[in-house]
Amino acid sequence: MVPCPRTRTLSVYAHSWASANRPGWIDKNHARALKPAKLPDMSTKVKVFTNEQLQKILEACDTYPERNSYGHNNRTRIRALVLTLRYSGMRIGDCIGLQKAHLQDDKLFLNTQKTGSKIFVPLPESAANALEKITNSSSYFFWTGKGLRKSAVANWQRALRKLFELAEVKGNPHMFRHTFATDLLSKGIPIEDVSVLLGHKSIRITEAYYSHWIKARRQRLEERVREIWT
């Protein structure tokens, strides 16, 4: 098909203008010079619970009010929530939406709301047993399934703040997730696998949050290799 004279004229004019004002713009692919954006180093903002703090939090579960306006058997439920957050690395919103059908023996099926990742993560016996002790009539462990999930999340966030006060520990629910990740990294789990368990869209996100721990692990590995040759 032969282009109409007007279209051909406009094309020639555009090429001439680009050549005169942007030399090399047409002939070169300047997109190749663009570099991917760097994610900021978030590792300095990551805070984790120590083993001593975790122990205090679990002990505080036994002194938490047994009954309040949100129902009964609260000590059992809040202990199960703490252990699930600690050993699954889930965000609190995903944890509150956790269905009982997602627990198979000692394995927890994770379907993160933020990224849609679907994986299984094994739980220690203490965490799996704590979940099995929850005997509410809902199909969810920590939510009635009625009303908005964000309202249930807000209620549990308040409950955890009270628990931290009882334990005399400064913290927030997301610190369980950071503790889970750094514990795996410190024990030699590859960052690629940790990234999958956290449901990150990219391994670069995991590296941005946990670069300090990755660097420390590499240094320990170098030291161990040096010990072999001495």
Image (cartoon, rainbow, N blue to C red):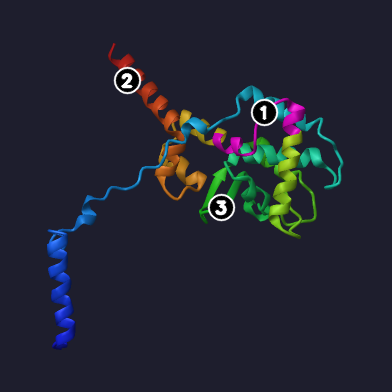
Mark 1 crowd level (few <14, some 14–19, many ≥20, 10 Å Cα): few
Mark 3 crowd level (few <14, some 14–19, many ≥20, 10 Å Cα): many
The quadrant of the picture occupied by the C terminus is top left
The amino acid beneath tag 3 is Thr
Residue at image mark 1: 170
The amino acid beneath tag 2 is Val
Nearer the camera: disc 3 or disc 1: 1
Q: Check if mark 3's residue and mark 1's residue have beta carbons within 8 Å.
A: no
Disc 1 secondary structure class: loop
Q: Is residue 104 visible?
A: no
102, above or below 127, in the image: below
**Label of residue 225 in the image:** 2
Disc 2 secondary structure class: helix
Residue 175, position as x, y percentages in the image: 60, 35
Magenta residue span = 163-178
**Label of residue 190 in the image:** none
Q: Earlier in the sequence, mark 3 or mark 1?
A: 3
The amino acid beneath tag 1 is Lys
Q: Earlier in the sequence, mark 1 or mark 2?
A: 1
- Main SS class of the magenta portion in the image: helix
Q: Is residue 195 visible?
A: yes
Residue at screen point 18% across, 83% down: 7
Q: Check if mark 2's residue and mark 3's residue have beta carbons within 8 Å.
A: no
Nearer the camera: disc 2 or disc 3: 3
Residue at image mark 3: 112
Disc 3 secondary structure class: loop
**Left or right relative to 194: residue 100:** right
Query: Is 181 in front, or is 29?
Result: 29
Q: Check if mark 1's residue and mark 2's residue have beta carbons within 8 Å.
A: no
The stretch drawn in magenta includes residue 166? yes
